[in-house]
Amino acid sequence: MESFEGRVAVVTGGGMGMGRELVAQLAAQGCHVATCDVDPDALDETAKLALEGARDGTRVTTCVADVSDESAIDAFRAQVEADHGPHLNLLFNNAGISGGGSFLTDGRDEWERTFAVTWGGVYTCCRVFMPMLVAAPEGHVINTSSVNGFWAAMGRIPHSAYSAAKFAVKGFTEALMGDFRANAPHVKASVVMPGHIGTSIVMNSNKAHGTLPSEMTDDELEKVRSRLVSQGFPVADIPADSLREGMQLMSEAFRDTAPTTAAAAATIILDGVLAGEWRILVGDDAHVLDTMVRQSPADAYTDSFLSELQKSGVFSFLGP
């Protein structure tokens, strides 16, 4: 695919972050875009921003839909066909949430919700939109995994649901490449593996799980305190309100101090798609971590590996 002009794209999770930037940058290049999200107000803002910078005649449409709900995605597909026609050229499976950290100590509901959105959304959208992609003269599936798709850790913090989901996304995308070559050679697949990107994923995930700091019960808050203390954070004796405030500030800092902005990430992704890259690493930190894991895979989950990673200057938010 040499250009996005005149093509039709679906972008999931387009309400903010990388999804919003993908919608805006695609529209600016003359690509018609249909996007979904669970937040209608955020979708309206995305559409407004995208249309302000879009080429003349470019269509941007929105649909409120949860990617883990197949009936909602079926309805989204019907709307896409009505608004944009029967062919789809680009499917950006971008939507995802974090959470469900420990398989042993965290709740099953949060674990399964994380997996259902972050992996199940990719699977469901591929199932639902694949006929439209195959029917087009050329198509491309772009699935957002993560560095947690090749390194199942977040420092010393258990990160099992998100990592399992992102490993599934990566493996599925790689499997699709061979499937497409055999059965639909005009369709391509790429897997995106971002590092630390400046988005609101922490806050949005807390909202999705009902674990916003301001809404946590005392028992939930103490569980978080114990985990932070075990990771070396000096929060054992601070008041509950101060801990809640600190957690909110940490969520905002994850967004505001990231080494790669959402806009820069979207540009890297789109450039990679046009270049025909099947494996798109986003951010210098992603490249550093990828190199380290490949060089010493047997050591990837040792304290010495984490120490070397921190010495490299990336992923400073992992803590001491």
Image: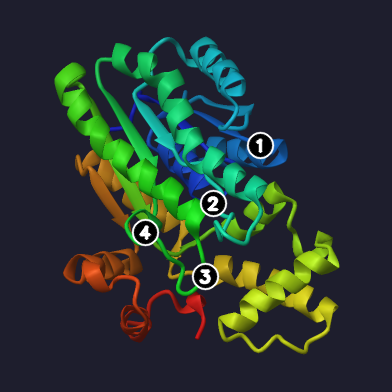
For the residue marked with disc 1, what is the amino acid? Val
| Residue placed most toward the observer, 58 or 100 | 100
| Residue placed most toward the observer, 220 or 19 | 220
Mark 1 burial class by Cα count in 10 Å: few <14, some 14-19, many 20+: some
For the residue marked with disc 2, what is the amino acid? Gly
Q: Name the mark nearer the viewer: 4 or 2.
A: 4
Report whether residue 56 is seen. no
Q: What residue do we see at 55% from left, 38% from top?
A: 116
Q: Are marks 3 and 2 in contact (CB under 8 Å)?
A: no
Return the residue at label 2: 17
**Image side of residue 103 versus residue 166, left or right:** right
Where is residue 195 shown, x and y percent of the image?
39, 62
Q: In terms of secondary structure, where does tag 3 sit?
A: loop
Where is residue 38 shown, x and y percent of the image?
66, 36
> Alpha-carbon distance for marks 4 and 1?
25 Å
> Alpha-carbon distance for marks 3 and 1?
28 Å
Q: In terms of secondary structure, where does tag 4 sit?
A: helix
Mark 4 burial class by Cα count in 10 Å: few <14, some 14-19, many 20+: many
Return the residue at label 3: 157
Mark closest to the chain's N terminus, 4 or 1: 1
